[in-house]
């Protein structure tokens, strides 16, 4: 299926690894011109049609500078993918999670997307066209414990923002959707200092056992495996394309069946 993304200009945040890197690869493969932002960009070098920019997306001006790079090089922004985000396990629960830790989660998972969106929408309204896809999380509405309480709150804010903007910007030709992955086979879950290793250290078991225990504690998933970054990327790129031209205000879950409710 041709997604009609050839020569479209896409900005991707948090683009150097995991889901973000998979999204960059998928957009590039569809012929888009991608401006990819992350703190480190070594993994982004050598890709055709990809401009890598080292930027601190948690800073107040970082997201706007990334969008500005796309405008300087290509003169327009057709697609924005807000992928940047981060989570730290809060093993001490709500009372052990400070205001500063909640603020950190909001800066990384909400305000970076908010600022990038503001910068991109300023240009998209001039074109009367654009597509924004926000990478949220099932933690936005599925919160089995307090281990990710600040992360879940920030992602819930992002899903809410997506819905609100879809209503305001739809009449101006701009679509806004979100994608909520469950556990994905990235460093966040499986890497050094990831969820599995952090829980393993706290509970005195090995990382593989910790991973299985965490998945069991949240109900497991029928497919029996983690989602891959490429599977999330495929959904994001479809939503960014004209093939999803009348899809807006939606939140798509890709979680292997983790969420059991309607």
Image (cartoon, helix red, strand yellow):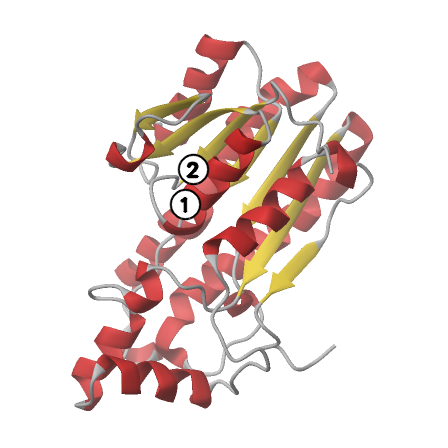
Residue 224 locus on image (x, y percent): 52, 80
Q: Nearer the viewer, residue 4 or 137?
A: 4
Q: Which residue is mark 1?
A: 84
Decide if residue 63 is in sight here: yes
Q: Are marks 1 and 2 in contact (CB under 8 Å)?
A: yes
Local crowd at mark 1 within 10 Å, few (<14), some, or many (≥20)? many
Which label belongs to residue 94? none
Q: CA distance from mark 1 to mark 2?
A: 5 Å
Q: Quadrant of the N terminus?
A: top right
Where residue 13 is drawn, which disc sits there?
2
Q: Residues within 10 Å of mark 2 (few under 14, many from 20)?
A: many
Q: Position of residue 121 (x, y in %)?
A: 61, 26
Which residue is rendered at x = 51% and y = 25% of the image? Answer: 119
Of labels 1 and 2, earlier in sequence is 2
Instruction: Identify the residue at image location x=54%, y=32%.
Output: 29
Please tell me whether residue 72 is drawn above or below residue 80 in the rendered image: above
């Amino acid at each position: 299926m041709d997604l009609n993304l050839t020569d479209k200009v896409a900005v991707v945040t948090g683009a150097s690894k995991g889901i973000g890197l998979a999204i960059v690869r998928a957009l590039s493969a569809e012929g888009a011109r991608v401006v990819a932002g992350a703190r480190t960009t070594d993994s982004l070098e050598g890709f055709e049609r990809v401009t890598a920019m080292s930027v601190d997306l948690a800073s107040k001006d970082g997201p706007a500078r990334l969008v500005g790079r796309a405008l300087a090089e290509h003169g327009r922004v057709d697609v924005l993918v807000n992928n940047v985000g981060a989570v730290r396990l809060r093993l001490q629960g709500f009372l052990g999670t400070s205001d500063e830790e909640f603020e950190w989660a909001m800066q990384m998972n909400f305000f970076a997307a908010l600022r990038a969106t503001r910068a991109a929408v300023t240009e998209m309204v001039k074109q009367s066209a654009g597509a924004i896809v926000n990478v949220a999380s099932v933690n936005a509405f599925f919160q089995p414990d307090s281990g990710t309480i600040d992360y879940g709150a920030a992602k819930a804010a992002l899903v809410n923002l997506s819905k609100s903007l879809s209503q305001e910007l739809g009449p101006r030709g701009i679509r806004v959707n979100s994608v909520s992955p469950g556990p994905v086979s990235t460093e966040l879950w499986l890497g050094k200092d990831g969820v599995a290793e952090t829980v393993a250290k706290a509970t005195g078991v090995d990382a593989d056992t910790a991973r299985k225990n965490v998945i069991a504690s949240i109900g497991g998933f029928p497919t029996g495996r983690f989602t891959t970054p490429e599977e999330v990327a495929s959904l994001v790129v479809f939503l960014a394309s004209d093939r999803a031209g009348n899809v807006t205000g939606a939140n798509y879950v890709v979680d292997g069946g983790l969420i059991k409710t309607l």
